[in-house]
Amino acid sequence: MNILVFGKDGQLGKAFKAIFDANNLGKLHCITYVGRAECDLCNADAIAELLNRIKPDLLINAAAYTAVDKAETEVHLAYAINAKAPELMAIYAKRYGATFLHYSTDYVFDGSKKTPYIESDVLNPLGIYGKSKAAGEEAIEETFANLPADSSAQYAIFRTSWVYGDGGNFIRTILRLAKERETLKVIADQYGVPTSATWLAEVSLALVLNKKHQLRLFPSGIYHAVPLGETTWHALACHAVQVALDAGVSLRLRPEAIQAIPAIDYPLPASRPMNSRMARSALEATLTDLTGDSSNMTKSQLLEQSWESQVEAYVQDLVHRKLI
């Protein structure tokens, strides 16, 4: 099987590579990792040439334009990477019967709902980043509409939130600042779920690969993919700092010195959703049906992980690798 991963230099792309390496899948399959240097996602011809040369059976799009505030002025770039490029990948997957995995965001919603969002809720993104990601979702769904009955093409769009992994992210920023400052102000009225890139990649593979690490059929569609629980940016910052302190890291900042502020006190060019919580019943139901044939973690191991336990493991690993 040929596997192609776009976004090799991002947090999710690195997580996929780590999992594939740990399972020696490079000996079983031909895996190609692509970053900006290998393929310009603003160049339709470059994308087409790469797809036709690699001929992937499993196409993983872990690449995205994620500069939320810059997107307000770099509109064309955001849409090229977040909407047009995924559409071209979807067209390839449909034409050649491939499996396509794509990643979207809580920013496709406006955050006004009082309860967690479900997959069928109406999209209403607040800014260009969210609008470009919503356009990507819609392009993929439209491309895969009306598939022939004998087609092997399938897709999954994973909506997730507050992703962190091997790279720059909120947790790393907070811990860096915690070594420099004795006080900090963090937003406390935006709710969401921190999501480990490693966990997200594991969930993705649990859906698409069987116990022999081969592709299997699954229900195509959108899946909300986040661990258990919910929190705020402020509570996440406090938790990360406390875990680092418990691990023996010398920090100037203490959790009690992190001041909770409303989002209105920290204005940014692009609006953020106040509620980024997402219900994941569709993912739970599908993985439950498929778990018996999964080569990855069991359903309970994956779906019963809380955001707190994942952040603890992440921070402890940063300490172990002397990255804090």
Image (cartoon, rainbow, N blue to C red):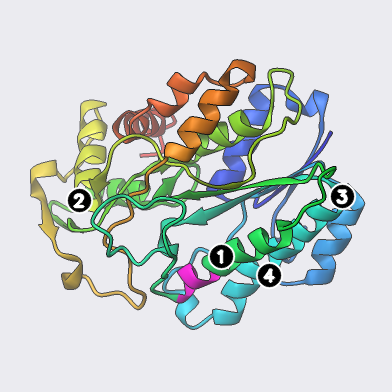
Residue at x-position 33% and y-position 31%: 306
Residue 84: give its label.
4
Question: SS for tag 3?
Answer: helix
Three-letter code for the amino acid on which mark 2 is drawn: His
Residue, disc 2: 234
Please give the range of residues in magenta.
128-133
Quadrant location of the C terminus in the rendered image: top left
Q: Position of residue 26 (x, y in %)?
A: 78, 28
Q: What's under tag 3, amino acid-wise?
A: Tyr
Q: Nearer the N terminus, badge 1 or badge 3? A: 1
**N-terminal label among 1 and 2:** 1
User: Which numbered disc, 4 or 1, marks the residue that appears first in the sequence?
Assistant: 1
The residue wearing badge 3 is 96
Earlier-in-chain disc, 2 versus 3 = 3
- Disc ID at residue 65: 1
Callout 3–callout 4 Cβ contact below 8 Å: no
User: Real-space Cα distance between discs 1 and 3?
Assistant: 26 Å
